[in-house]
Amino acid sequence: MKRLLKYLILTIVLTVSYIVIIFLGTDKGWWYTPFTHEKAPDAFVVSVQEELQNEYVGNMAIAVFENGKLAKESFHSNGKTVDRNTVFQVASLSKFVSAIGVMKLVQEGKLDLEAPASQYLTRWQFPEGNFDSNAVTIRRLLSHTAGLTDGLGYAGFEHTKDVQSLEASLTNAQDADPGSDGKTAVGILPGSEWRYSGGGFTILQLLVEEASGQTFDVYMRTEIFGPLQMTSSFYEWDETFGSRLCDFYRTDGSVAQHRYYTAQAASALYTTLADLEKLFYFFDGDHSNQKPLSTEFQKRMWQVEAKTLGAPIYGLGTFLYTEIENGEYIIGHDGKNNPPINTAFRYNPMTNNGIIILTTGSTDFATRIASDWVFIQTGKIDALLFVMQQDKMIRTFVIGLFVILVLVISIALIRRTTK
């Protein structure tokens, strides 16, 4: 019995040690190999174009910044020509921009970050549940810590006539992605954990309309895009941009259909590479003359509001990809939707370096390239790259556990034989 206990303890010690090594190795990038080691913008973009040949990407627009200046642009298309003025849908990258609009209302005193969202709502209210909806504050909605369990994911609608009202979508989103019941409700204790919620940003969209007296699209065009001169950015489809809209593709290369959204703040921003470059300059005070948001409120968005697995993950509408130094993080947001749209925005506030990538036809190309850019710049695995590495980490763990079991059993058999 004592011998069995010794082997059991040995197995546990080896397993725990192995788990720690695998987790730290994945988190620290000890054995991660990026798609390129080129750091200079020109060489990096050449490597991106080479990487495009290894898989299907329908359209791509990319911009790389160095020391606060645009260093390189590049484009790719399988159909209609793509350039810096081509209009893309950017999926959940919309949240990053929408949050700026919410924070402007906070700056003006029209919304209070600590106030219950229900205090401002007249057109819709949270359904009854087991948790106090008054604990759902605007801060928690912006940071995905409001206790919402909707799991949305919006697939959009094929025709504009089918697009729901905001109130109807919050009650039961008819375009919910598979796996969600489409209901926006408080399902866990507000403030208890970070749980990504598309429904939370749809509530914020409604709050903006209630507080401003304007539709969300009109408010964002007037208060955010106007001052930044983002003249080709909007949330509600505008037919005047029809000839500039990029083609949509599925992963097999077949043409996909343009989708329309109720959840504009969460999923529906239309913009161009040129306009997102102006947004990039907004973060650098030396470039932006007409800032819709003060530097103080802008930087509030970059403070840690939520953690996962003990690591900072999110601010106010902003991913915190990896810590650089002195409590500063590479910030931005990614977007992913179907038919395949994948977008990424990364900004380093210490160096004013950054990258923007917009794609259609691929589920993860933009995120992988942007995360590798972070790794090349900092030597660190960013939050989304860590998530993408989890399947590999689990496979490695399973293989290692098998090896450990075989090793311990072999030791036991050898010792038994020798005795």
Image (cartoon, rainbow, N blue to C red):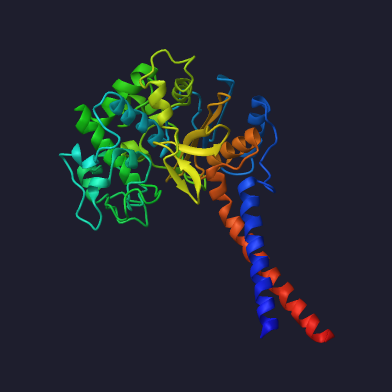
- In the image shown, does 6 or 413 lie closer to the viewer? 6
Residue 226 figure quarter: top left
Q: Position of residue 350 (x, y in %)?
A: 56, 26
For residue 187, side relative to residue 196 (left or right): left
Q: Is residue 205 visible?
A: yes
Q: Position of residue 285 (x, y in %)?
A: 47, 17
- In the image shown, does 389 or 62 lie closer to the viewer? 389
Residue 179 figure quarter: bottom left
- In the image shown, does 247 or 208 lie closer to the viewer? 208
In the picture shown, does residue 26 fall above or below 301?
Answer: below
For residue 108, side relative to residue 290 (left or right): left
Numbered label tally: 0
> Residue at image x 32%, y 49%?
190
In the picture shown, does residue 392 fall above or below 275?
Answer: below
Q: Position of residue 372 (x, y in %)?
A: 61, 39
> Residue at image x 37%, y 48%?
153
Residue projecting furthest to the top: 289
Classify the position of the C terminus by image quarter. bottom right
Residue 243 figure quarter: top left
Classify the position of the N terminus by image quarter. bottom right
> Residue at image x 40%, y 23%?
296
For residue 250, side relative to residue 211 (left or right): right
Residue projecting furthest to the front: 2
Q: Position of residue 223 (x, y in %)?
A: 30, 21
For residue 285, side relative to residue 239 (left or right): right
Q: Is residue 345 visible?
A: no
Residue projecting furthest to the left: 122
